[in-house]
Image (spheres, rainbow, N blue to C red):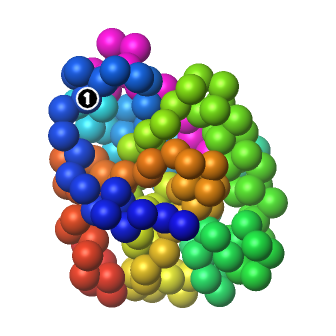
Amino acid sequence: MLNRQDCASPVVSWSMAAHPFLVSSCLAGIPCRYDGNARPDAEIIAAVENGHAVPACAEQLGGLPTPRPAAEIRGGDGSDVLRGTAAVITDQGEDVTAEFIAGAEKVTELALAHGITEAVLQARSPSCGCGVVYDGSHSGELTRGDGVLAAMLTQRGITVRAVRGNRDTSTADENAGSPA
């Protein structure tokens, strides 16, 4: 089960990381978000450049293009998607659950192959969100829960934290239901 304390912990300095950690590619400055943009975070970019972090985008690795329609989890959170009781649906009504699961599996395999024990992921994302994700209505409303990748990594024992780019940490997401 996801450790909410870990999810809400602010991200500190990664310059002294003893082991490599996983990061959302968009935080590393790679334009892979659904809208074709990045969500660059200078400290995470430096960690990648120094070999302390491994970037990955589960949605791209799952076969989705960039840009792509916005997607949200309907009927639960990432853990529910992995149990088969929720789905990832685009704002155009397309079910992309299989792609989200496939991408999460590939990123999890990558993390385990690199001995990664910690991940810093993009907050609120249906893949990477940790503790808070959009509610599936495509209305900007938030709900408690985790993205598909965050849930899978947590199930495999990897500590997950969320960042909203440029040090805006998941602690700001404690007020679910208040979109930023």
Looking at the rendering, the stretch of residues picked out in magenta corresponds to 45-59
In this rendering, the answer to whether 142 lies above or below 96 is below
Quadrant of the rendered image containing residue 57:
top right
Quadrant of the rendered image containing residue 12:
top left
Badge 1, how many Cα within 10 Å: few under 14, some, many 20+?
Answer: some
The front one of 177 and 7 is 7
Does residue 57 show up magenta in the picture?
yes
Whether residue 172 appears in this view of the structure is: yes
Instruction: Give the position of the N terminus as an image quadrant.
Output: bottom right
Is 8 situated left or right of 134 in this image? left
Q: Position of residue 135 (x, y in %)?
A: 50, 83
Whether residue 87 appears in this view of the structure is: no
Question: SS class of the residue under badge 1?
Answer: loop
In this rendering, the answer to whether 33 lies above or below 43 is below
Does residue 141 show up magenta in the picture?
no
The front one of 38 and 120 is 120
The front one of 13 and 115 is 115
The three-letter amino acid code for the residue at tag 1 is Trp
Is 110 situated left or right of 12 in this image? right
Count of all numbered marks drawn on residues in the image? 1
Residue at 30%, 31% in the rendered image: 44
Residue at 30%, 24% in the rendered image: 17
Q: Which residue is mark 1?
A: 14
Q: Position of residue 143 (x, y in %)?
A: 43, 83
Residue at 22%, 65% in the rendered image: 171
